[in-house]
Amino acid sequence: MNGHIASWLGHPVTLLLAAVLLGVFLVIVEVLLRSLAEMGNVRFQGMLEDHQKLLPVEAETPLHMSRLLDALRWLEVVGAGLLWTVLFLLSGGNRGLGFALGVLVPVGLIAASRLLIGAVAEDAVVTLLRVVRPVVWPLVALIARFDPGPQEPPPEDDDEEVSERELR
């Protein structure tokens, strides 16, 4: 049974399907990174208020957008690494071809998504976040639990400062 599973996992069609799915995931994450960065934290917080079940955050402790961007960057790195591994296996052990595919395909996908797709509207960001939510949700929950992000500065004291003129 294990031999059949290993044969299926090593089959070129299976590897090609995995490479296509990882490539699509990489493009989605890159579009989200670009769109969220251009959106800004205020619009992001409004988006979370409009779609309360989008990410695992509570109303009392809002999630700063930088924490989501950090999670997406880590997912992009992991996705690119997995894509590199699958493409290397797809090359059939040819190290030169595997290295070339592993570098050119992820870089080409990221460049194409930056140049051709660019930033998308807020509704598209919500839809893309729903697509990647099963992968993003646990990572964002972990980040929000340990480091909620920048907090508002503490209120300043209302004590009046004494000027030099008043001292004289």
Image (cartoon, rainbow, N blue to C red):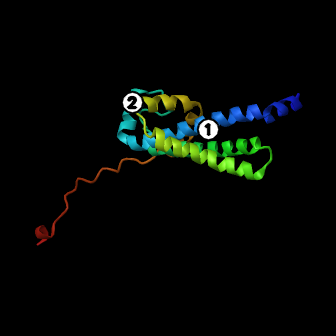
The image quadrant that residue 123 belongs to is top left
Q: How many marks?
A: 2
Q: Position of residue 118 (x, y in %)?
A: 45, 40
User: Amino acid under label 2?
Assistant: Glu
Q: Is residue 26 left or right of residue 67?
A: right
- Residue at 64% x, 33% y is 21
Quadrant holding the C terminus: bottom left
Residue 24 image point, x, y percent: 59, 35
**Residue at x 64% of width, y 50% of height:** 103
> Image height check: is 13 above or below 109?
above
Give how far apart the Cα atoms at labels 1 and 2 are.
31 Å
Task: Measuring from the top left, give residue 65's x and y in whole percent.
Answer: 44, 42
Q: Quadrant of residue 164?
A: bottom left
Q: Residues within 10 Å of mark 2 (few under 14, many from 20)?
A: few
Name the residue tied to disc 1.
23
Q: Is residue 101 above or below residue 159?
A: above
The front one of 166 and 20 is 20
117 or 39: which is nearer to us? 117
